[in-house]
Image (cartoon, rainbow, N blue to C red):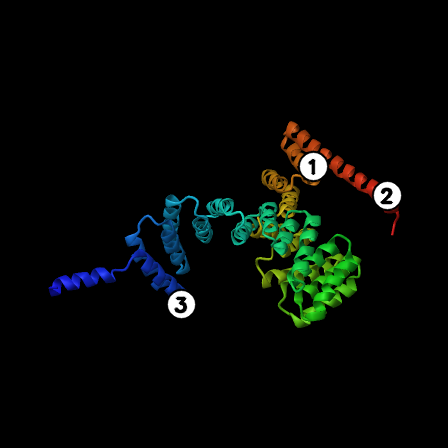
Amino acid sequence: MRPAVALFAALICHAQTAADYRAQANALKARGDAAGALAAVENALALDQRSAALEDEAGFLLAVLGRYPDAVPHFEKAIELDPSLASAHLHLGAAQWVLEHRDAAVASLRTATRLAPRDRDIRIRFGDALFETGAYAGAATEYEASAAWAKAGYSQQRAGKPQQALADLRKAIQFDPKDTGARNALGLLLVESGSIAEGLRQFEAILKDDPRNGPALANVALAYLQQGHFDRAIGQCESALAIYPDAPGLYYTLGLVKRQKDDSAGAATAFGKAVELNPQFAEAHYALGITRWQDGDFDPAEAELRAAIAIRASYPEAWLMLATLLRQQKKTAAAIDAIQEAIRLDPESPGAHNTLGQLLSAKGDTEGSKAAFADGARIEKLIEAGKRVMLDRAGPAAAKVH
């Protein structure tokens, strides 16, 4: 065989296929060499330009390298080639989320979940997106379907469904008794629902294994607050702050106790410290806003309420209080906008409908005012009817004063 022919034959024998490049990419990825793996995948794509899996992999590696805008077209191409490829929809949604295209990300993740309803990781990722956008009920559905019970409990709590939250958090603890986050959340919900002794038992179980657990220490103080033991609550906060001087949750709890003791200045100082330590602490902004308002400092109060809303747009209590504050300052148009948002987020609040009725009346909208008051009255009747049903079911013992 002539030398040139032999060389050509050798090149043919050693030419790499798309499968060879894919194997090379997998090996490089396993070693943590994302850039090398991407180069190998690009070589594979040059040989197989109709592979949805390769387009998806190229996009994934670009995302790993932080090149999200470059990754998106690859995911879109993969979906064009194979619309049923759930991983491409998942990766596209993740990239869109990082790029802050939230609506598009949710839509992509929803499609991924529809295509792979039994994929736990996809459903949890979709649930995370729903939770972050304030769609707590939808998030709970995804988490429950994935047996992510702790996350489901947090979502149900945010959705205003404490009984479902309690059930999910109990399952989380049954699954993992060492999940202190779920146990703290369960204990706090129990305290808020009046089962204070049971809530304290949850915190004590945490502190038995971890005496320095900051959230549990703060929650014990909240339990004392709920019981009306204000001095014990303050002592608990101060003891915990000696261990965790930079814990915003402890300052927040201390502020709540101070406010109950009519120590407005002390409450404002504590809430202010909580916000200083964690500027994203929506509840602390809200509490500080209410405290400022009670002290007659309207402009700082409005600023804090708006800060709470900026952090968590789906915060109906903050919208309601902002509307009430604005109404007090005769800022009727802005107050109407705020109360309508509060109603959108929590349509079952009779107080919000009544506030809207008052605002519309001040504006001269008689028909709108009547309708709002009627909605408030209708909801109040439903609430009272529900209470009567619960009392009837509980029997005569429920009427006793304990």
Mark yes or no: residue 240 visible.
yes
Q: Compute the Cα span from label 3 to label 1.
A: 63 Å
The residue drawn where x is 75% and y is 68% is: 235
In this view, the residue in front, 225 or 60, is: 60
> Label 1 sits on what residue type?
Asn
Outermost residue, left direction? 2
Secondary structure under the numbered disc 3 in the rendered image? loop
Q: Which residue has dot 3 on it?
A: 31
User: Which SS class for mark 1?
Assistant: helix
Q: Is residue 151 or residue 177 the one in the foreground?
A: 177
Q: Which label number is shown at residue 77?
A: none
Q: Residue at x 68, y 59 (%)?
A: 174
Q: Nearer the viewer, residue 281 or 367?
A: 281
Label of residue 354 in the image: 1
Residue 179: x %, y % from top left: 64, 62
In the image, residue 154 above or below residue 339: below
Q: Which label sits in the foreground, 3 or 2?
A: 3
Per the image, the residue denoted by label 2 is 395
Among the 4 quarters of the image, the one containing residue 287: bottom right
Residue 207 image offset from top left, x and y in percent: 71, 68
